[in-house]
Image (cartoon, rainbow, N blue to C red):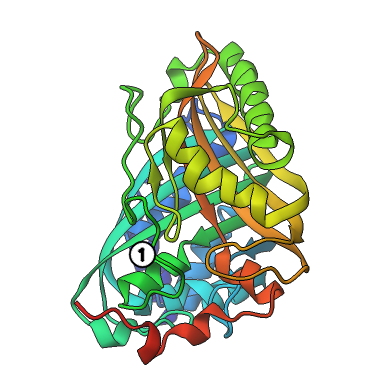
């Protein structure tokens, strides 16, 4: 019977499975492989059949693949080595938490060896995830923000950083574990450009734009979060910065400075950034790594602890490569992972005190 399940899974997925995910695909190698893998997952092919699912995923991942995700107080998400741990720790818990999840990739930028996506998903709750009590909200609509960054080994994925906005999920489940921001929360849109959804369309990309965009993004990131005293000059005045829960959406450089950067500079001294992946395809870039500093000022409602903290981040940008400026940015952070370094467990705040009463 298990052999039959494997055969059925392969037949169901025959439109995306070939001897190689790159057969007939002229996009960057990473994009070809990840797109084929994403289709298997989003179509829920053999999602709860380990043997069938393993055979499918081995087409796209190395056997020693690493899946690096949010900090959680249990085994959901976290860091997994190998497809089996990923299946048990993230794939199955996610599918048990959300019903009929529909994914909308907003940006999908790739080179041959690196790739990144930023996505939002819509679903309804049906169970818990990482101690977030979705089972109390069965049938309620939920929005999930997601990013992924990838490193390839040849035609297979070796490393995948995946982050969910877990503070946003706590909010969707009815708990405000961090102070309400002044800016609009839980709102994100596709890039305001006719570059495709997701952007960009690989065959229309000018490789010279990728080089220009990468330099602009790196300069802006370091200026904003390490060296600068204001938003980077690379941002247009009417910029949009789609921040995660607890930050909100800044729709101008004034809002970005007042609500995002100034509080960041006042909260952290000896700031630095460790970039792990910075990849661009045309005008679209993604960068992930760690923002570091000593917590010497109030931040997101918490008094200074004088502790050194490394905050996992993932930023995405749309760059105007003609005028060499940035109109749009997208940001997510592993806030529970940051706060646990300060001795604060955000998951424990899902209690009556922090419940949202409408």
Q: Residue at x 50, y 33 (%)?
A: 317
Judge by depth and name the residue closer to the eye, 216 or 358: 358
Tell me if residue 158 can be seen. Answer: no
Number of marks present in the image shown: 1
Which residue in the rendered view is the most extreme toward the top? Answer: 322
Q: Is residue 183 left or right of residue 178?
A: left
Q: Neighbour class for label 1 at 10 Å: few (<14), some, many (≥20)? A: some
Query: Looking at the picture, does residue 33 appear above or below residue 327?
Result: below
Q: Which residue is mark 1?
A: 45
Q: Where residue 49 sits: x, y (%)?
A: 43, 77
Query: Where, quadrant-wise, is the C terminus in this rendering?
Result: bottom left
Whether residue 160 is situated above or below residue 306 in the rendered picture: above
Query: Could you tell me residue 29's position as x and y percent?
Result: 58, 34
User: Could you tell me residue 213's position as x and y percent?
Assistant: 59, 21
Where is residue 330? Give x, y as percent.
46, 42
Position of residue 112 relative to residue 310, above or below, is above
Q: Nearer the viewer, residue 3 or 34?
A: 34
User: Disc 1 on helix, strand or loop?
Assistant: loop
> In the image shown, does 307 or 95 lie closer to the viewer?
307
Residue 222's place in the image compared with 171, above or below, is above
Residue appearing at x 34%, y 65% in the figure: 44
Q: Residue 223: in sight, yes or no?
A: yes
Q: Is residue 33 left or right of residue 221?
A: left
Residue at (30%, 86%) from the top-left corner? Answer: 135
Apparent side of residue 328 relative to residue 136 in the rendered image (left or right): right
Quadrant of the drawing holding the N terminus: bottom left
Residue at x 29%, y 78% (from the top left corner)? 356
Which image quadrant is residue 99 in? Answer: bottom left
């Amino acid at each position: 019977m298990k052999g039959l399940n494997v055969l059925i899974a392969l037949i169901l997925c025959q439109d995306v499975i070939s001897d190689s995910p790159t057969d007939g695909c002229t996009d960057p190698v990473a994009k070809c492989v990840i797109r084929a893998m994403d289709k298997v997952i989003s179509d829920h092919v053999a999602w709860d059949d380990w043997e069938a699912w393993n055979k499918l995923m081995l087409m796209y991942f190395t056997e020693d693949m690493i899946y690096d995700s949010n900090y959680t107080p249990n085994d959901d998400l976290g860091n997994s080595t190998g497809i089996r741990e990923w299946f048990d720790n993230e794939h199955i818990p996610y599918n048990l938490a959300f019903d009929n999840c529909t994914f909308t990739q907003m940006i999908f930028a790739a080179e041959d060896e690196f790739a990144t996506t930023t996505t939002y998903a819509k679903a309804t709750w049906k169970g818990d995830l990482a101690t977030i009590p979705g089972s109390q909200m069965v049938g309620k609509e939920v929005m999930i923000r997601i990013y992924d960054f990838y490193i390839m080994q040849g035609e297979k994925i070796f490393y995948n950083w995946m982050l969910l906005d877990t503070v946003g999920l706590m909010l969707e489940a009815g708990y405000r574990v961090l102070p309400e921001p002044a800016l609009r929360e839980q709102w994100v849109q596709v890039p305001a450009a006719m570059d495709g959804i997701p952007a960009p369309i690989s065959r229309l990309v000018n490789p010279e734009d990728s080089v220009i965009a990468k330099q602009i993004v790196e300069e802006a990131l370091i200026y904003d979060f390490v060296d600068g005293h204001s938003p980077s000059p690379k941002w247009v005045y009417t910029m949009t910065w789609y921040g995660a829960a607890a930050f909100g959406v800044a729709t101008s450089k004034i809002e970005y400075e007042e609500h995002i950067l100034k509080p960041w500079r006042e909260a952290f001294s000896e700031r630095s950034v460790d970039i792990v992946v910075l990849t661009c395809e045309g005008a679209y870039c993604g960068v992930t790594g760690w923002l570091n500093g000593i917590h010497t000022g109030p931040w997101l409602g918490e008094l200074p602890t004088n502790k050194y903290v490394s905050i996992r981040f993932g930023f995405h940008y749309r760059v105007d490569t003609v005028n060499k400026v940035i109109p749009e940015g997208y940001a997510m952070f592993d806030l529970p992972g940051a706060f646990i370094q300060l001795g604060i467990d955000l998951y424990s705040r899902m209690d009556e005190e922090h419940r949202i009463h409408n």
